[in-house]
Amino acid sequence: MCVCGGARACVCAATARGPRIALTQPLIGPAVFRYPTQCASMSSSPQEQNQELKEEAKAEEKENKNQEMNEEKRQKKKEEKKEEKKDSWKDFIYNQRTGEFMGRTASSWGLIFLFYLVFYGFLAGMFSFTMWVMLQTLDENVPRYQDRVANPGLVIRPHAAEISFNRSDSKNYNHYIQQLNDLLQQYNDSVQEGNDLCLVGEYTEQDDEPVKKVCQFKRSTLRQCSGLPDTSFGYAEGKPCIIIKMNRVIGLKPRGDPYISCTAKSDYVQPLVAVQLLLSKEDFNVEQTVECKIEGSDLRNNDDRDKFLGRVIFRVKVSE
């Protein structure tokens, strides 16, 4: 109900459930307002009020139902997410719904395997073809590039920079003896009999020969270091033998008569490419430094950048 007094103010009293509204704006003439029900000079009837209450109750019920439905949907989504997390790794391996394995269908996997089969097959074929072409340019007997190996190096057997052992205990030097025996197996006299007998200082040209010949080098020429008269190669007596070998360089024709010269702190015997250190009791328990060089030719033996070019240095220590 609205009551307007004069031209200055108008106060409306709504129904029993409506708010109270005050208007201070000047008004001219009678005023009628509707908030939220019809505001007139007379109050609403009881039937209209009951109808409004019923409508409001229905609206509240609808809101409650909507809230309950939304809450149920949220719960279902949470449960679905939990189930998805549990079944995610299983579905990744094999998904029964889509038939995918590891995220791909059978046709997709087949196309991938086919692509990589063709790709790697092409790479393997290209690699095999390039290797075949390269092998056609190589010689089985002579290296294609050997300009960087103008001078030979020296190596020793036993293969050790420091040879140290106790002559009283054979276990200390058995592995040295085994290395020497393994090296000299191909130099046995029975094996070398099938090779050609070459004269010292003569070169045999075989560049045009399809089958290359080799010269004899019998094990027996090493005498006391051959392992034939003394199977311990002098290690049992404290006079060890060391085999010194010059690396092979194809086409090498040195001037003069090259030989290997070794210097040490004690006496030695130099049978061809084998050196025996004749150590005395005073030399035992003392480390002996031995240096061997190629002498008597134009082959280099003093290159500071390559300490093994034309020379070799090793140490020997014999204990009682």
Image (tube, rainbow, N blue to C red):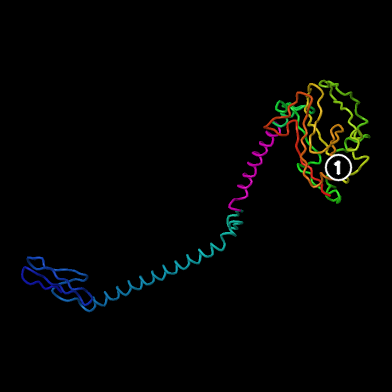
Is residue 6 rendered magenta in the image? no
Residue at horizontal 85 percent and vertical 51 percent from the top: 171
Quarter of the figure with residue 43: bottom left
Query: What's the amino acid at mark 1?
Result: Lys
Quarter of the figure with residue 219: top right
Q: Is residue 140 left or right of residue 50?
A: right
| Residue 49 coordinates in the image, percent (x, y) | 24, 76
Query: Which sits in the foreground, 278 or 82?
Result: 278
Is residue 126 rendered magenta in the image? yes
Q: Which residues are magenta?
A: 102-129
The residue at which mark 1 appears reads as 239
Q: Is residue 146 left or right of residue 277?
A: left
Q: Is residue 246 above or below residue 87?
A: above
Is the N terminus in the top left, top right, bottom left or bottom right quadrant?
bottom left
Q: Is residue 112 above or below residue 45?
A: above
- Mark 1 secondary-structure assignment: loop
| Residue 46 coordinates in the image, percent (x, y) | 22, 79
Query: Of helix, strand and loop, which mostly describes the magenta segment?
Result: helix
Q: Is residue 185 left or right of residue 164?
A: right
Residue at horizontal 85 percent and vertical 22 percent from the top: 201
Q: Is residue 31 above or below residue 276?
A: below
Quarter of the figure with residue 121: top right
| Residue 145 coordinates in the image, percent (x, y) | 72, 27
